[in-house]
Amino acid sequence: MELRHLRYFCVVAEELNLTRAAERLHMAQPPLTRQIKQLERHLGAPLFQRHSRGLVLTPPGQFFHEHALQILEKIDVTVTSTRHMARSKHRIFGIGFVPSVFYGQLPLLVRGLRQKDDLELTLAELTTVQQVQALKAGRIDMGFGRLLIDDPEVVQEVLFEEPMMAALPAGHALEGTRPTLAQLAEDHLILFPATPRPSLADMVLGLFRRRGLKVQVAQEANELQTALGLVVSGLGITLVPEQVSRLTRDGIVYAYLADSGITTPIICSRRKGEPPSEVMQAANEILEVLVENRRSGRYP
Amino acid sequence: MELRHLRYFCVVAEELNLTRAAERLHMAQPPLTRQIKQLERHLGAPLFQRHSRGLVLTPPGQFFHEHALQILEKIDVTVTSTRHMARSKHRIFGIGFVPSVFYGQLPLLVRGLRQKDDLELTLAELTTVQQVQALKAGRIDMGFGRLLIDDPEVVQEVLFEEPMMAALPAGHALEGTRPTLAQLAEDHLILFPATPRPSLADMVLGLFRRRGLKVQVAQEANELQTALGLVVSGLGITLVPEQVSRLTRDGIVYAYLADSGITTPIICSRRKGEPPSEVMQAANEILEVLVENRRSGRYP
DNA sequence: TTCCACGATACCTCCAGGGTATGGCAAGGC
DNA sequence: GCCTTGCCATACCCTGGAGGTATCGTGGAA
């Protein structure tokens, strides 16, 4: 499959007529028909129902159309940004983070670093795995995630272990108790983030799996707050880091777990063996203060 | 540019050696060199620095690598999901929504619909524009967004107008006041969601633009809570729908605006002229109750 | 019944992807 | 200092496949 397949498909999906789509694409109708058939063979899924006067998208065709558009859009954006970047001329300090660590002290680190002159920070939402890859490739300089990853080129430091709490719909039978993972496993689970993986979602699944507990995943959400919205909807329960519970939300109650040791680490990742730059030293100092504050319970 | 360019590029970026990359790709080294050069010409950006013993990624190359991997991954996922869907056999009621509407009553609509037997809901995070496209294509059946879009095939109903509030870092000079948009325009603005566009971000930009106010966008974030994290970081301020302020967060204060009429609509979009199915009727009834509750100030 | 719109197939052309051969450069080893 | 080696870039070549035209088959509209 090539991009031209996606491009051709999207135009056909919009026109629902191969002849008109071919005109838009400045090509003849028969080769377009063949390219669409080639795409369908590759996917092993019919994307259109053929009729004597035009086409109708099948449900898989509708699904594929939605995502093909997103893919083409992301490609456009990536190309444009890459071109833009090629014209830019300055060194930046890149920080990668998973969104769930942005509820605690990380914003204060960013605030501290921003007070330094002549430093441009870039912040990228990346999974921990992506952070490790990005560090190795030099795309970021520091990463904050939740998963321990064994990589000889990257050093990971556990800043602290954050307890996980259950997020339950208000009125849930377990409200006001300290539920066990076994009790929670009887409910449906809402996972976040949906993609990319592996992520905190997989860590959560691992918690249950290691205790021989089977869970039913009711839904996945991209954003943590969307997951909480789904909890309000009654689709199930979710597990969140403790800091998240500080944002009280209608329809949600949080509960500490009865099981001990149910924590998620906040992990700082750096490249191994790299003498720290001045910026990195400054970041490390700010981090030490933040970790000490967190350990001693001093919040801003 | 085709997908093979991205595939070749990613292998080269991993190996940093064209000869080894060619071996991995089961092709000869000279055509691989040409394909990479072709990609660089297309981008108008050098992706590698050449050395006598291998390559080094340039910063644009690093950036492009990160995104190319995401694109290829999304393609893989899309292909797999499309194949899976082709084997599936059932009709679903699809709801599209922008994340910021999931802080209010939408979760209750989902909860209500889930009580109906034999109904499978799918929930998709989509911009309002994407919702209109998805409705027309039959990919979803109802959408909840923030932008009015004139489309002859889609009916939009404004459920209610939600006031926008300023989210300020605690300690901000405007804390405890009712700031004007002009005052806010003097600060940096944090926008969300970053992509895709147009979205609530553009609606916010429009608020300032229509009053002849220029804003400086300090950063964009994908998630609303990440944007709030950036506010905590001191990067700037952001505007959020009123419902969001119910989640109090350390380091953030919310302020009603002095200007009147600064609201964001919650809009329900449906296909035009379609006789409502039983499910659609049920959804409409639940919505009416929710809207009435919201108007009369009765919260659950 | 006839006409037309439309997608699918058969056959054809030619270009671009991938091949081999080879050159140039620089780092490493002796 | 010289030779060897690793590696990327260019020149030239071949052929498979993308895209072309011609035409057929089907079904809806007039």
Image (tube, coloured by chain):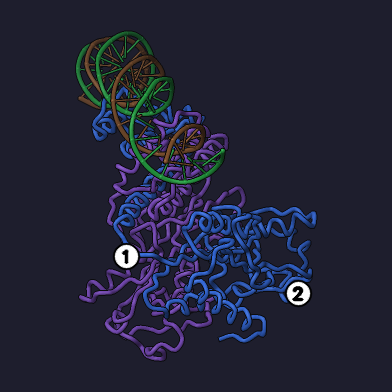
Chain colours: A blue, B purple, C green, D brown
Secondary structure beneath disc 2? Answer: loop
Task: Indicate the quadrant containing the N terminus of chain B: top left, top right, bottom left or bottom right.
Answer: top left
- Residue B104 lies left or right of residue A259; in this view the side is left
- The image quarter in which residue A146 lies: bottom right
Query: Quick check: can you spot residue B274?
Result: no
Indicate left or right for C14 with B78 as reference: left
| Residue A50, x across and y down, in percent | 39, 27
Picture quarter with the C terminus of chain B: bottom right
Could one spot residue A160 in this view of the protein? yes
Residue at (56, 61) in percent of width and height: A271
Within 10 Å of disc 1 (Cα), the crowding (few <14, some 14-19, many 20+) is some
Q: Residue at x 43, y 50 (%)?
A: B57
Q: Position of residue A206 (x, y in %)?
A: 71, 56
**Residue depth check, mark 1 versus mark 2: number of the one nearer the observer:** 1
Amino acid, disc 1:
Asp
B33 in relation to A281, above or below: above
Q: Is residue B177 left or right of residue A143?
A: left
Q: Is residue B83 depicted above or below A269 in this figure?
A: above
Q: Which residue is mark 1?
A: B202
User: How far from the left and from the top, in percent, is residue B170?
Assistant: 46, 86
Q: Which residue is pictured at 55% across the width and 75% down the height?
A: A284
Give above or below for A237 relative to B248. Answer: above
Query: What is the chain identity of the residue bearing mark 1?
Result: B
Checking the image for residue A177, the label placed there is 2
Task: Give the tally of numbered discs.
Answer: 2
Disc 2 residue crowd, few under 14, some 14–19, many 20+, Cα 10 Å: few
Q: Nearer the viewer, residue B116 or B199?
A: B199
Q: Residue at x 49, y 70 (%)?
A: A277
Is residue A198 placed above or below B227 in the rendered structure? above
